[in-house]
Image (tube, rainbow, N blue to C red):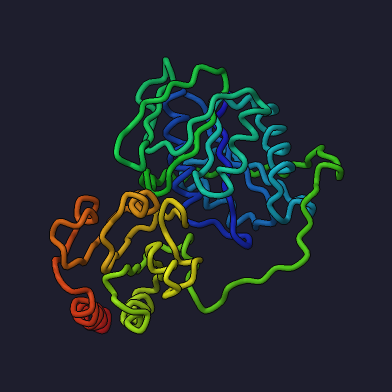
């Protein structure tokens, strides 16, 4: 019996997201009185793999098959299922990001395992295995019970703190038994965005809404983002008007993000927008309307004109950074 955690890597490196998952899985392993095994698929150096031990991994299974260089949902599911059965995994943890949302349901069907997506904390009880998640666009909480022998959980980003344990994990190279017929995804070309922080990966996001009044007023948003090393985003009305590209639209019908800090300028906070940013660790809002819904979700708020607050805020941050 063990707890398995899928640790996604980006060009051979792990990010905070993966360390958060390992910390979470490690605590579940403690509750179940068992060990934690991290699964890594792709070319990752041993020195990088060992970083997972810092957050509690007892063992790391590395799958370095060149055929799996790019995410293929069907093939990855088969590999993880192989390892789960080999290791006798009773709990399997993924991130509630694009990869986790693609893999966890497939694995759930394959292993006939119960699945809770978007869990926000450790199980409330082990018998029955009960998890809490947000529902109704973050307006309420649900307690969900998994009754199957194997449990699968996807963890909402920024829902769990990093806990250092400084384990020295063993690393096992794993050779998968899947055949070539299972690999159906062919990547013909890869174009990477350069010179800009990717929105879904950003720790800090600076976002603007209709309160910015015009696409010509976006300079201060971009300047603040550059100062903070942040990504830029916008509300749906802004992208619908063509002020900003649709790739920056955050919300229920846009990108779902979970940065450490979300700065919202001139965004009223419609429920659809809040659904996409509610997992942010801290939300700072600036709006002229003191009754704007965004203030109900914000940790800090300023009632004021975004066009006047932005330059002052940017100057203050630059001053602090230079001191």
Residue occupying the point 67% across, 48% down:
41
Q: Residue at x 56, y 18 (%)?
A: 149
**Residue 291, located in which quarter of the rendered image?**
bottom left
Above or below — where is 129 with respect to 268?
Answer: above
Q: Quadrant of residue 269?
A: bottom left
Please state the horizontal and vertical placement of residue 148, each as a whole percent of the image: 55, 18
Of residue 272 and residue 49, the one placed in the foreground of this image is 272
- From the top left corner, tell me how far across and down residue 271 is, in percent: 32, 49
85 w.r.t. 214: above or below? above
In this view of the protein, which residue sits in the foreground, 50 or 151? 151
x and y percentages locating residue 204 in the rendered image? 37, 65
Residue at 26% in and 60% down: 268
127 vs 224, left or right, is: right
Residue 290, picture quadrant: bottom left
User: Residue at (64%, 44%) from the top-left corner?
Assistant: 171
Count of numbered badges drawn on the protein:
0
For this view, does 128 lie left or right of residue 274? right
Furthest residue in direction front, as rendered: 241
Q: Quadrant of the image for the C terminus?
A: bottom left
Q: Quadrant of the N terminus?
A: top right
């Amino acid at each position: 019996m063990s707890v398995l955690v899928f640790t996604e890597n980006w060009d051979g490196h792990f990010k905070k997201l993966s360390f958060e998952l390992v910390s979470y899985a490690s605590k579940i392993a403690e509750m179940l009185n068992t060990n934690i095994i991290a699964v890594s698929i792709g070319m990752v150096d041993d020195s990088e793999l060992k970083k997972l031990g810092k957050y509690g991994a007892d063992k790391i299974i590395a799958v370095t098959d060149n055929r799996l260089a790019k995410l293929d949902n069907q093939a990855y599911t088969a590999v993880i299922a192989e390892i789960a059965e080999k290791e006798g995994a009773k709990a399997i943890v993924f991130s509630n990001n694009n990869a986790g949302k693609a893999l966890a349901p497939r694995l759930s069907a394959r292993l006939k395992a119960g699945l809770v997506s978007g869990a926000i904390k450790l199980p409330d009880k082990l018998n029955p295995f009960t998890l809490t998640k947000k529902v109704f666009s973050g307006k309420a909480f649900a307690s969900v019970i998994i009754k199957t022998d194997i449990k699968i959980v996807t963890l909402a980003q920024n829902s769990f703190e990093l806990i250092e344990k400084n384990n020295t994990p063993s690393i096992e190279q794993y050779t998968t038994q899947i055949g070539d017929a299972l690999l159906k995804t062919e990547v013909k070309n890869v174009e990477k965005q350069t010179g800009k922080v990717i929105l879904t990966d950003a720790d800090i996001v600076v976002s603007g809404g209709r309160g910015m009044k015009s696409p010509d007023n976006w300079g201060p948003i971009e300047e603040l983002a550059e100062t903070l090393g942040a990504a830029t985003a916008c509300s749906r009305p802004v992208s619908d008007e063509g002020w900003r590209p649709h790739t920056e639209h955050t919300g229920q019908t846009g990108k779902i993000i979970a940065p450490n800090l979300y700065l919202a300028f001139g965004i009223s906070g419609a429920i659809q927008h809040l659904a996409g940013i509610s997992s942010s660790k801290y939300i700072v809002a600036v709006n002229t309307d003191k009754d704007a819904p965004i203030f109900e979700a914000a940790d800090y708020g300023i009632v004021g004109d975004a066009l006047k607050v932005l330059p002052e805020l940017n100057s203050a941050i630059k001053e602090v950074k230079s001191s």
